[in-house]
Image: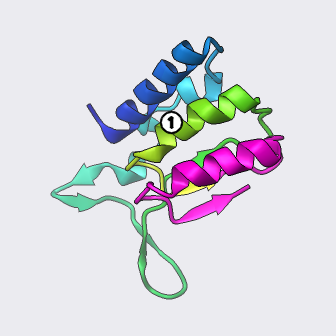
Amino acid sequence: ASSMDVFKARYVSACTELRIDPIPQIVALSEALYPEFSSVNGRKAGATTTTDKRPHTSRKLDLSSIRISGKGAIAIAEAIRDDTYFTDLDFCDSFLGDEGCVIMCEALKSNKSALSVEL
């Protein structure tokens, strides 16, 4: 299974345990949405370069403007904790609140792939 599939499976499992409905935008995630990151001859296809000339292969989880409940934040945090797929996370205007932000920050302490987080 791909690392995105692992992320989704962990998220859906956490939602089931918490007895909440998963956010459809997360369930619908597919690596097909990120074709520029598929492997071609062992190299990342379509990698762009930032202004400082470093390769940039961002994979963004954009949940901006999606209302996320407290339990929803817990479920996402469970999936993010050990996620290796997403490099950029956007929770702007997601109404996480103080509790949701604390939950997300705690999960990110063990995440090794996130380079950018917007709360």
Q: Residue at x 76, y 43 (%)?
A: 99
Residue ID at (63%, 60%): 117
**Labels in figure, total:** 1
**Could you tell me the amino acid type at mark 1?**
Glu
Answer few, some or many: residues within 10 Å of disc 1's Cα (few below 14, many 20 plus, some between 14 and 19).
many
Position of 26 compared to 118: left or right?
A: left
62 left or right, relative to 111 = right
User: Where does residue 24 sit, x and y in percent of width and height?
Assistant: 63, 22
Looking at the image, which is closer to me, 69 or 38? 69
Residue to which mark 1 is pinned:
78
Task: Give yes or no for residue 109 being in the magenta stretch.
Answer: yes
Residue at 58% of width from left, 30% of height from top?
Answer: 75
Q: Which residues are magenta?
A: 90-119
Secondary element at image label 1: helix
Q: Return the x and y of residue 61 as percentages of the image width and height.
A: 57, 46
Is residue 54 shown above or below 88? below
Q: Residue at x 51, y 23 (%)?
A: 14
Vertical arrangement, residue 13 with respect to residue 47, above or below: above
Q: Is residue 108 magenta?
A: yes
Residue 82 appears in the picture as rendered: yes
Let me know if residue 60 appears in the view. Answer: no
Within the image, what quadrant is residue 42 found in?
A: bottom left
Q: Could you say where residue 15 lies in the image, as x and y percent from the top left?
A: 57, 19
Look at the image and tell me in which quarter the N terminus lies: top left
Q: Nearer the viewer, residue 65 or 46?
A: 65
Above/below status of 35 relative to 44? above
Q: Find residue 23 and report its horizontal and vertical position in percent.
A: 65, 24
Image quadrant where one finds the C terminus: bottom right
